[in-house]
Image (spheres, coloured by chain):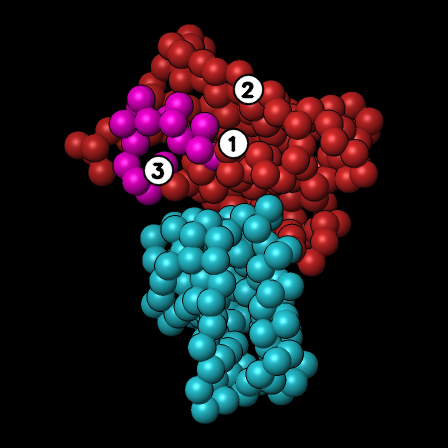
Amino acid sequence: MKVTSSYQDGRLTLFLQGELDHHQAAAALRRISRTVDDYLPQDCVVDMGGLTFMDSSGIALILKISRLMGQSGGRAWVVNAKNQPLKVIDASGIDRMIKVVV
Amino acid sequence: MKQTNYIKLEFPSRSVNEGFARAAAAAFAAQMDPTMEELGDIRTAVSEAVTNAIVHAYPDAVGQVQMRMRILEGDVLEITVRDRGRGIPDVKQAMEPMYSTGGEERSGMGFTIMGSFMDGLRVRSAPDKGTAVTMKKRIRTKEQT
């Protein structure tokens, strides 16, 4: 699991790549929290285009990012989720709480 | 129900084994010629069940996790994840969406996803005796999908 990021005009984009499970989630969360603290963005886009697998740990990660952004009055949403990760998002129902752009 | 093939695996409850368990499950299931989606469903459900055992069964220690898989008549794959950990005091409550006693990297959606991705889910647990999660998935032949 790899997390990279880019920042432009108040928008932080997080690119998630590889497999996201419980084993990977804690380190990814620490990394993302640090990045959000560094930039204090208005918007955070979670780009899941490079994610080949995620389980419910990915749901926890999305909810945490949303909460982190909410604390500073910002917004977060998910883009490019495909196949298996998208199916997990659909099954969890978090798209009722967080915008998911397919 | 007659079984046609099976495997039994045992591994310590270390989180690094989550990826191994779902890869092993996918490798075993491959002989049933599942679709990519079915394979994804199996990997997801196994990841959830094994993670539950690692996080909840042995919160302060490393214990044993067993995974048994068998192919039953009618193209049904049965997967059982068994631990000998502390057990679930209230299975019904644990299976409610968003209920979690895990850390911030857990969402409480594990059982919901297992139930949604598989065709059958049964959870048996007893305090200090452990938990057995049994899931079934019928593999549709490619002509039917």
Give the residue at the far bottom of this rendering: A9
| Image position, residue A42 (x, y; %) | 54, 87
Q: Residue at x 38, y 27 (%)?
A: B27
* Residue A65: quadrant of the picture: bottom right
Q: Nearer the viewer, mark 3 or mark 1?
A: 1
Q: Residue at x 51, y 83 (%)?
A: A43
Q: Are marks 3 and 1 on the same chain?
A: yes
Instruction: Please tell me whether residue A85 is drawn above or below residue B6 in the rendered image.
Output: below
Instruction: Please tell me whether residue A89 is drawn above or below residue B144 in the rendered image.
Output: below
Residue A23 in the magenta stretch? The answer is: no
* Kind of residue sitting beneath label 3: Glu
Q: Residue at x 58, y 83 (%)?
A: A39
| Principal secondary structure, stretch drawn in magenta | helix
State how far apart marks 3 and 1 are (Cα): 16 Å
Q: Position of B52 compared to A21: left or right?
A: right
Chain letter for red, please: B
Q: Is residue A70 visible?
A: no
Please say if the residues under marks 1 and 2 sit with CB atoms less than 8 Å apart.
yes
The subunit carrying tag 3 is: B
Instruction: Give the residue at mark 3.
Output: B38
Residue B37 in the magenta stretch? The answer is: yes
Q: Position of A15 compared to B86: left or right?
A: left
Chain letter for cyan, please: A
In the drawing, what numbered circle is on residue B21? 1
The subunit carrying tag 1 is: B
In the drawing, what numbered circle is on residue B9? 2
* Kind of residue sitting beneath label 1: Ala
Q: Is residue B41 visible?
A: yes
Q: Is label 1 in a helix, a strand or a loop? A: helix
Write the start and end of the magenta stretch as one range: B22-39
Q: Nearer the viewer, mark 3 or mark 2?
A: 2
Q: Is label 2 in a helix, a strand or a loop? A: strand
